[in-house]
Image: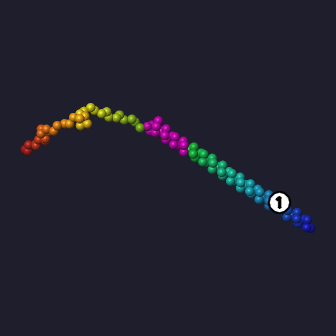
Amino acid sequence: MATGAGKKQSREARERTRKYNARQEFHAGLVARRRRDNLIAGIGGGALILAIVGGQIAYYTMGPGTPVPEPTPTPTTSSSPSDGVVPEVTPSDAPEPTPTP
């Protein structure tokens, strides 16, 4: 009878080993899938961010968001103290009092 008991134990051991290996392979497959999914999501997210930034840049440089150029004022030619001409102050430049009614 010793030989029959040994066969049963070895059969159970082989079954446990097979199940253990199957669980390990299943777990390794899950880890690989998570890694692949995270990589795909990272690449997709990065591409989405680049597309958004590129769209904003294009909108504000070429599209309807472009600022309208305004004309710059042109300097006028007039005598100023920087020209070396200093205006003279005369007593006639003083304000005159207004008559009282």
Give the residue number, with chain letter if any, for mark 1. Answer: 14
Decide whether the magenta segment is chiefly helix, strand or loop. Answer: helix
Question: Who's the residue at 49% across and 41% down the image?
Answer: 56
Q: Is residue 20 above or below residue 58?
A: below
Q: Residue at x 40, y 36 (%)?
A: 68
Q: For this view, does 8 lie left or right of residue 52?
A: right
Q: Given the image, on which type of amino acid does mark 1 rest? A: Arg
Quarter of the C terminus within the rendering:
top left
Indicate the position of residue 17 as horizontal and vertical percent values.
80, 59
Please give the range of residues in magenta. 49-66
Image quarter (top left, top right, bottom left or bottom right) of the N terminus: bottom right
Judge by depth and name the residue closer to the eye, 5 or 82: 82
Q: Position of residue 55 (x, y in %)?
A: 51, 40
The image quadrant of residue 22 is bottom right
Residue 1 in view (yes/no): yes
Most extreme residue toward the right is 1
* Residue name at image x 39 percent, y 35 percent: 69
Tell me which colouring the rendered structure shows: rainbow
User: Relative to residue 62, is residue 89 drawn left or right?
Assistant: left
